[in-house]
Image (cartoon, grey):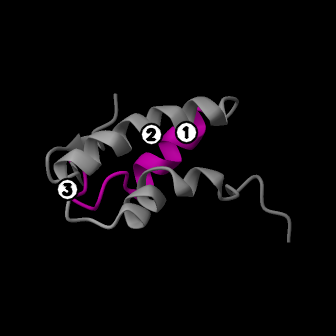
């Protein structure tokens, strides 16, 4: 079990106090869902819904990028330079 879980309603990381999901949790989630990217997006989408309820002042686009948008970015193994 990770120590980098969300602290609600502020949505900071319980392990490092960065905005959740922090870089460490993102790496962990990429590894956990390596063969199931759609499942990862659905999982994080549920958190996005909760976060929008807890942080109604936050711009929707910023929350989307923070919770779900990064899942579409190429991971370290997926980059082709």
What is the distance, in whole Å, between disc 1 and disc 2 at their CAs? 5 Å
Q: How many marks?
A: 3
Asked which secondary structure carries label 2, the reply is: helix
Question: Which comes before the other along the chain, label 2 or label 3?
Answer: 2
Query: Are there few (<14), some (14-19), or many (20+) residues within 10 Å of tag 1?
Result: some
30 left or right of 3?
A: right
Q: Report which residue position mark 2 lands on.
A: 44
- Residue furthest left as drawn: 9
35, above or below 20, in the image: above
Residue at 67% in and 55% down: 75
Q: Nearer the viewer, residue 47 or 74?
A: 47
Image quarter where the N terminus lies is: top left
What is the distance, in whole Å, between disc 2 and disc 3 at their CAs? 16 Å
Report the magenta residues as a range.
14-33
Disc 1 to disc 2: CB gap under 8 Å: yes
The x and y percentages for residue 55 are 20, 56
* Image quarter of residue 22: bottom left
9, above or below 42, in the image: below
Residue at 65% in and 53% down: 72
What is the distance, in whole Å, between disc 1 and disc 3 at their CAs? 20 Å
User: Does residue 63 belong to the magenta stretch?
Assistant: no
User: Which mark is nearer the camera, 2 or 3?
Assistant: 3
Q: Report which residue position mark 3 lands on.
A: 55
The x and y percentages for residue 28 are 49, 41
Q: Nearer the viewer, residue 35 or 54?
A: 54
Residue at 20% in and 65% down: 57
Q: Report which residue position mark 1 lands on.
A: 41
The x and y percentages for residue 38 are 63, 33
Query: Are there few (<14), some (14-19), or many (20+) residues within 10 Å of tag 3?
Result: some
Disc 2 to disc 3: CB gap under 8 Å: no
Question: Which comes before the other along the chain, label 1 or label 3?
Answer: 1
17, above or below 81, in the image: above
């Amino acid at each position: 079990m990770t120590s980098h879980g969300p602290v609600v309603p502020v949505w900071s990381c319980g392990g490092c106090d960065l905005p959740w999901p922090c870089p460490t949790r993102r790496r962990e989630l990429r590894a956990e869902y390596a063969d199931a990217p759609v499942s990862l997006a659905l999982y994080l989408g549920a958190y996005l819904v909760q976060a929008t309820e807890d942080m109604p002042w936050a711009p929707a686009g910023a929350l989307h990028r923070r919770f779900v948008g990064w899942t579409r970015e190429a991971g370290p193994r997926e980059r082709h330079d």
